[in-house]
Image (spheres, rainbow, N blue to C red):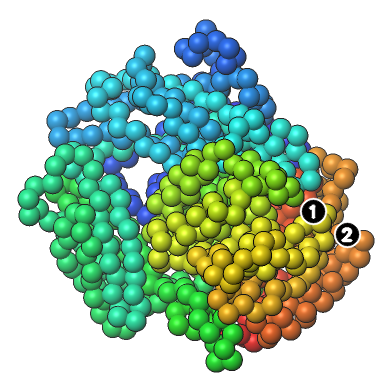
Amino acid sequence: MVGLIVAAAMMTSFGEKITPENAWREYPRPQMVRDNWTNLNGVWDYAVTSVTNTPGRPAKWDGKILVPFAIESTLSGVGRLLEPNEFLWYTRKIECDPKPGERILLHFGGVDFRTMVFIGHDEVTDVPHEGGQNPFTLDITDYVKKGENELTVCVWDPTENFVNSRGKQSFKPSGCFYTRVSGIWQTVWMETVPDRHIGGYTVKTDIDRGEVTIEFKVESGKCKVGEQGTIEIEDSASSRLCVKNTFTPGEPCTIKLPAPVALWSPENPKLYNFTAKYGKDVVKGYFGMRKFEKHKDSKGVLRFFLNNKPYYVMGTLDQGWWPDGLLTPPSDEAMAFDIKTLKDCGFNTMRKHIKVEPLRYYYLCDKMGILVIQDLPSGDGDAFDPQKASVVPRYGLQRLEMKEMMDVLQAVPSIVMWNPYNEGWSQPGEFLTHSMLDFVTRYDRTRLVNGPSGAWDWEGGHLIPKGWEWSKRIVTKHKPEGECEAADAVDLHLYRGPGMIDVNPRRISFLGEFGGLGHPVEGHLWKEAKGSWGYGGIEDTKTREGLEKTYLGLMEKLGELAEKGLGGSIYTQTTDVEIEINGLMTYDRKVLKFNPEVLREAHRKIIEKVR
């Protein structure tokens, strides 16, 4: 270890390589790249103060922290828990050179939860930013001077004391809830852009027509009447120029691609790169030509279809936690390792479980080829109490965060289905559940929408949890049209399982969680904690032989269900997480508990039953 970072009880091999000089140096937004940018990751000063004090500069700074790792993490160099009655402060110097006709943008990939930003003594955030999972941007042009400026960030994180989306963070980690994460946990960076610049874009692909439609949004200043931009599209594999076209900001630009069109899939993740120019602004991005829908197969069973062919979704529950970085992966290499391991084991999908990853993660999914079912991080709500699950006082915040997440991730081809609710957590009762599903379906027509995953699904194969035993029950007696028609799948959670809900004429039968076979690996347990457990138990899976035999038994049953109409399945889970030991890998990623060739062959047989 070098600099701030000290050895901890559990480190990944990737975390062991991290230094203040190499921490997260890559461009943080591969979906829209500019050349002129400044990485602000590295060593900052930090301090913790009481919230009872009027917000202001700390009287003194407590020490150094390595951004972008959360203060609770080992890789931050601090490893301190932040309490809800405390403010977390950061400061560092930044160099700026404001020029006429240019804007300086300050980007935060993720800060949990409520954030105030200052340049010198001026607050840039007129209203503190709320939300720990989605990125945000501030225009600091009017606040900075040429040369050195002081950047200060103040964060308050209530974790469980508020209705904020927090996923599995907890004050008291136990069971399936983990160490909390506060403050900056993703890349902080600046870029200089022209006054009139591209602020983002949306992508819609039509593989049947061989067309892509891109709409560019322009920020700052006024568009000149009739002013257009240009876009050049090239094949990412050969860098061959495919087509050049013009676009008008704010209007859809439909472009015909030359045949044969390269389709994107996990088996063949072909991408197209593009360069867009508008005035003095130049951005580079990419897209994948893919189509993910629900259709009936030749037997009349409703299934997932990828690129017009039946496709069995074979995935894992992917929590995205790390023993050394917590919510923050140690590096690009670490993220790619997880994805490659899943593919080596024959999985084609991951369910990104109540966490939003850094944008580079999704780029790797696009590039390496794996489908992503994206959860909305949950907040308050009791999964096992219908009275509490029926009322969420901040449904508006939940819906806003869902919209923000969809906006940020819209251009990611690997994301094929949204999952707004997990096991009733934060689920706001029947009417608002239908409202959310309808909103998501209407807002993004390019993806499917999962019904409530494993819990309150009024008229949709309704699952009431009783401990860890799940039973089918009709929660409310409505007419058939009262079903969550906006959803495309009806989702069962069953441990060990597998199992399925009867084939539905309007929604795909989906097994959103199952398995959870526990297997402890000595020397690779979280703080060697007692109480390690797995959703599916550990009695017959303590040995590697027993684990593999039991897993293959589950796969045999899963194959039978796939033939009957099951559309996909999500095994729990990619890695151990803290005291959960039901991962394919240990928490430190140093031990793969299975023979990947054995898993790949078992999964191939199931996938081929559907094709």
Q: Decide: is 266 above or below 326.
A: below
Task: Find disc 2 in the rendering and name its residue.
Answer: 538
- Kind of element beneath mark 2: loop
The residue positioned 19% from the left and 35% from the top of the image is 102
The residue positioned 43% from the left and 37% from the top of the image is 108
User: Is residue 228 at least partly visible in the picture?
Assistant: yes
Q: Give yes or no for contact between labels 1 and 2 (Cβ–Cβ under 8 Å).
A: yes
Q: Decide: is 581 above or below 82.
A: below
Q: Nearer the viewer, residue 30 or 312?
A: 312
Q: How many marks?
A: 2
Residue 110, given in percent of the width and then of the height, sits at: 49, 39
Q: Looking at the figure, which quarter contains the N terminus?
A: top right
Task: Find disc 1 in the rendering and name its residue.
Answer: 581
- Looking at numbered disc 2 in the image, what kind of residue is underneath it? Ile
Q: Decide: is 9 above or below 153.
A: below
Q: Residues within 10 Å of mark 1 (few under 14, many from 20)?
A: many
